[in-house]
Image (tube, rainbow, N blue to C red):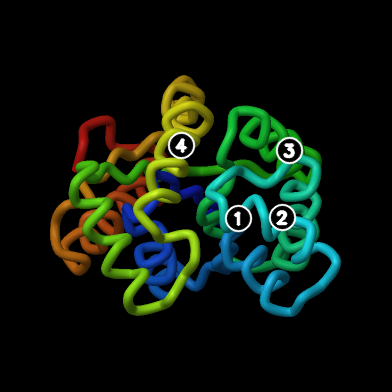
Amino acid sequence: MLNLVIFGPPGCGKGTQSARIANKYGLMHLSSGDLLRNEIEKGSDLGNHVKHYVEKGFLVPDSIILKKVYKNTIRFINSAGIIFDGFPRSLVQAVMLDKFLNKKGLNLNMVIHMLVDRSELFNRLTGRAEDSGRKDDTEQIFRVRMRVYEKQTHCLKEYYSAQNKILQVNGMAPVEEVSAKIANAIDYYREKNEVFSDVI
């Protein structure tokens, strides 16, 4: 299996690049955000419980998101691999994901860290809000989500760097160019079993 994580600040292109990677390599795309938004749209008990967190820009409690991700990971356990989009979002979640995969005899191969300037992130999110109507893409919520990211998620860079798994990607380039660079890095890893150490 080829198991990947993609993370970065809100609006960095995680969902777009995850979908392209999944399509190219035949991986299952597991988006924690999509899972939660689907529950909210269905009006399920879980959706009603997490709605406040999602729409306010806060992280959903670990116990809830871990259970949801584990359940879906098991569904894909015999696939070519999984790309975890937007998960983990905290150090606790990262540690628990490693433990969960290890118990299944699996591991993460690469962690893609998307780098995008703050001003560009805001422009992308406001544009996305106009297109999709997502309630968590307002300026106020963006500021909350950025604070949450900087406090709870950015530390994943150090955690995965210590495992030599971090691939840092300049997400400011056009989508196709970013995708091509990521694909080259994945192909390199599959051949050399080594992750590029420089920003691509």
Residue assigned mark 4: 149
Please, what is the three-letter code of the amino acid marked with disc 3? Answer: Asn
- Label 2, residues with CA under 10 Å away: few <14, some 14-19, many ≥20: some
Q: Which of the two discs, 3 and 2, sits closer to the camera?
A: 2
Residue 165 visible, this orientation: no
Residue extending farthest front: 140
43 left or right of 37 in image: right
Q: Which mark is residue 54?
A: 1
103 left or right of 35 in image: right
Marks 3 and 2 sit apart, C-alpha to C-alpha, by 15 Å
Looking at the image, tell me whether mark 1 or mark 3 is earlier in sequence order: 1
Q: Which of the two discs, 1 and 2, sits closer to the camera?
A: 1
Marks 2 and 4 sit apart, C-alpha to C-alpha, by 19 Å
Kindly identify the residue that appears in the image at 21 percent across and 36 percent down. 199
Looking at the image, tell me whether mark 1 or mark 2 is earlier in sequence order: 1
Residue assigned mark 3: 102
Image x and y of residue 15, in percent: 42, 64
Marks 1 and 2 sit apart, C-alpha to C-alpha, by 16 Å
84 left or right of 9 in image: right
Q: Which mark is residue 69?
A: 2
Please, what is the three-letter code of the amino acid marked with disc 1? Answer: Val
Q: Cβ–Cβ below 8 Å for labels 3 and 4?
A: no
Marks 1 and 3 sit apart, C-alpha to C-alpha, by 29 Å
Q: Cβ–Cβ below 8 Å for labels 1 and 4?
A: no
Marks 3 and 4 sit apart, C-alpha to C-alpha, by 26 Å
